[in-house]
């Protein structure tokens, strides 16, 4: 933007109004605004843009929650998730409406003023659809698949930047897993000649570097491997701890196995306020176990009011108060999970079959046959009605806009399915603990 004084002056002129409105709607909006406006300005230049080759390789659509339509949002089923999606759509639309005068002042072409174009430009700083693979020790290869990565931070602008090559990395969920050490012996035997070279670039254990990369004194964006990569192995970049709903909201994908996943259920209001635990710490782990804070809150809630203060120190230490108290805790938690599952219109098993059906449709050459052979005819008919498409249309292959919607529908179903699986695991965990405690 600094290289284009016209854009810079227009953004500065609109800054007070945008700051008062947009920063309330979306905290990063003013930063992203600059990046979005610059991106759209470059797109508007067409082939005359110095970034044309890079821009022409960007994806044409994204799957973040803000791109979900009403049908896809309702497919999430869980109220909290639906609220997050609706809020994302509303925030982006508000940003577009507030930025429209600025874009008109910059004489953007009509196509660049459309909401769907703004949505694409907003999502682009968060995404690239390629995978970076190790080919040989000194070479890499690129495979065009749908993955995501975030804008890269630079020292001179809080809005960040789009970085060709640097934005090719897929996401690696951070956790405490150290299983990579288990392959060291075998890897060392197979790659002795490479290890000398790898050791030269490997960070030693006393290094203070805590990130996977950054813009450094060399005036280059440097990225660092935290492990030994083998030929054909995907290179991953960790850029934060996210739940699946957060990944879907900001990056448009989710993980089948996410070590940072948190499943929330509606708890009694007094249970959320009687302790000092933040509400977002009261969740269920992917394996069905309650979080430390949730378990402590439930133990406190199952304690008579006149004894809560005297037992609070023991509860806060994570200790079980008594067999009777723990039985009551497990019964309450298990019942709440069962109640939550019963309120949802479909089961995890049915959702799993629906995901399989939606994936087949996205790769189908004759969708009618697939629909007729499935048990999801009614669901698909509702999908077509929402998109104002006749079930008896003559095309054997689905329209591109329908295929994109199917992809987002599948993501919504996958999310709600994993949500239900976590609750089901919690029910089983509670039943198992109740059986064990009953024998004592």
Image (spheres, rainbow, N blue to C red):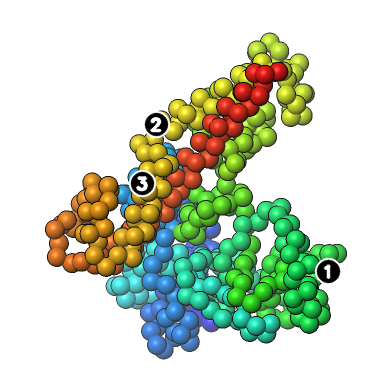
* Residue 218 drawn at (x, y percent): 73, 81
User: Which of the marked residues, 3 or 1, is nearer the chain's N terminus?
Assistant: 3
Query: Which element type, helix, strand or loop, lies under badge 3?
Result: loop
The residue at 58%/63% (across/down) is 171
Question: Label 1 neighbourhood size at 10 Å, few (<14), some (14-19), many (20+)?
Answer: few
Q: Earlier in the sequence, mark 2 or mark 3?
A: 3
Where residue 440 appears, x then y in whole percent?
A: 71, 18
Please say if 122 is above or below 275.
below
Residue 187 placement, left or right of 173: right
Q: CA distance from mark 1 to mark 2?
A: 52 Å
Question: In this figure, which residue is indicated by the disc labeled 2?
Answer: 343
Which residue lies at the image location 73% right of the left edge and 24% below the top edge? 320
Residue marked by disc 3: 75
Q: Residue at x 68, y 34 (%)?
A: 292
Q: Position of residue 47 (x, y in %)?
A: 40, 88
Q: Nearer the viewer, residue 308 or 338?
A: 338
Q: Foreground: 61 or 34?
A: 61
- Kindly tell me whether residue 264 is visible in this rendering: no
Q: Which residue is mark 1?
A: 204
Q: Disc 2, disc 3: CB below 8 Å?
A: no
Q: Nearer the viewer, residue 66 or 38?
A: 66
From the viewer's perspective, is 155 left or right of 403?
A: right
- Of 62 and 351, nearer the camera is 351
Q: Secondary structure at mark 2?
A: helix
């Amino acid at each position: 933007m600094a290289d284009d004084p016209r854009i810079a002056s227009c953004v500065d002129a609109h800054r007070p109004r945008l700051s008062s409105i947009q920063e309330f709607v979306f905290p990063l909006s003013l930063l992203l605004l600059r990046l979005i406006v610059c991106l759209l300005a470059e797109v508007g230049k067409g082939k005359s843009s110095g970034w044309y080759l890079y821009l022409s390789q960007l994806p044409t659509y994204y799957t973040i929650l803000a791109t979900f339509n009403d049908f896809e949002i309702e497919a999430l089923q869980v109220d909290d998730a639906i609220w997050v999606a609706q809020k994302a759509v509303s925030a982006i639309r508000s940003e577009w409406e507030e930025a429209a005068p600025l874009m008109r002042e910059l004489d953007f072409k009509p196509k660049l003023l459309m909401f769907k174009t703004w949505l694409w430009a907003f999502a682009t700083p968060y995404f690239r659809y390629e995978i970076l693979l190790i080919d040989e020790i000194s070479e890499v290869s690129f495979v065009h698949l749908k993955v995501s990565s975030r804008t890269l931070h630079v020292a001179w602008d809080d809005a960040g930047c789009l970085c060709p090559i640097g934005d090719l990395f897929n996401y690696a969920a951070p956790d405490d897993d150290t299983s990579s050490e288990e392959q060291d012996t075998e890897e060392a035997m197979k790659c002795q000649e490479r290890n000398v070279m790898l050791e030269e670039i490997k960070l030693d254990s006393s290094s203070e570097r805590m990130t996977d990369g950054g813009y450094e004194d060399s005036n280059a964006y440097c990225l660092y491997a935290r492990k030994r990569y083998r030929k054909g192995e995907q290179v991953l970049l960790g850029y934060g701890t996210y739940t699946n709903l957060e990944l879907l909201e900001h990056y448009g994908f989710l993980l089948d196995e996410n070590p940072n996943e948190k499943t929330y259920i509606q708890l009694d209001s007094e249970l959320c306020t009687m302790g000092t635990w933040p509400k977002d710490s009261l969740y269920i782990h992917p394996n069905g176990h309650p979080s430390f804070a949730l378990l402590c809150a439930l133990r406190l809630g199952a304690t008579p009011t006149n004894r809560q203060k005297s037992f609070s120190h023991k509860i806060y230490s994570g200790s079980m108060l008594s067999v009777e108290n723990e039985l009551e805790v497990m019964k309450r938690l298990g019942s709440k999970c069962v109640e939550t599952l019963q309120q949802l219109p479909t089961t995890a098993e049915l959702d799993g079959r629906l995901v399989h059906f939606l994936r087949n449709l996205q790769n189908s050459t004759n969708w009618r046959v697939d629909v007729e052979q499935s048990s999801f005819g009614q669901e698909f008919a509702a999908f077509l009605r929402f998109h104002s498409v006749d079930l008896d249309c003559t095309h054997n292959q689905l329209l591109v806009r329908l295929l994109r919607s199917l992809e987002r529908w599948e993501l919504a179903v996958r999310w709600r399915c994993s949500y239900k699986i976590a609750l089901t695991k919690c029910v089983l965990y509670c039943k198992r603990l109740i059986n064990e405690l009953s024998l004592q």
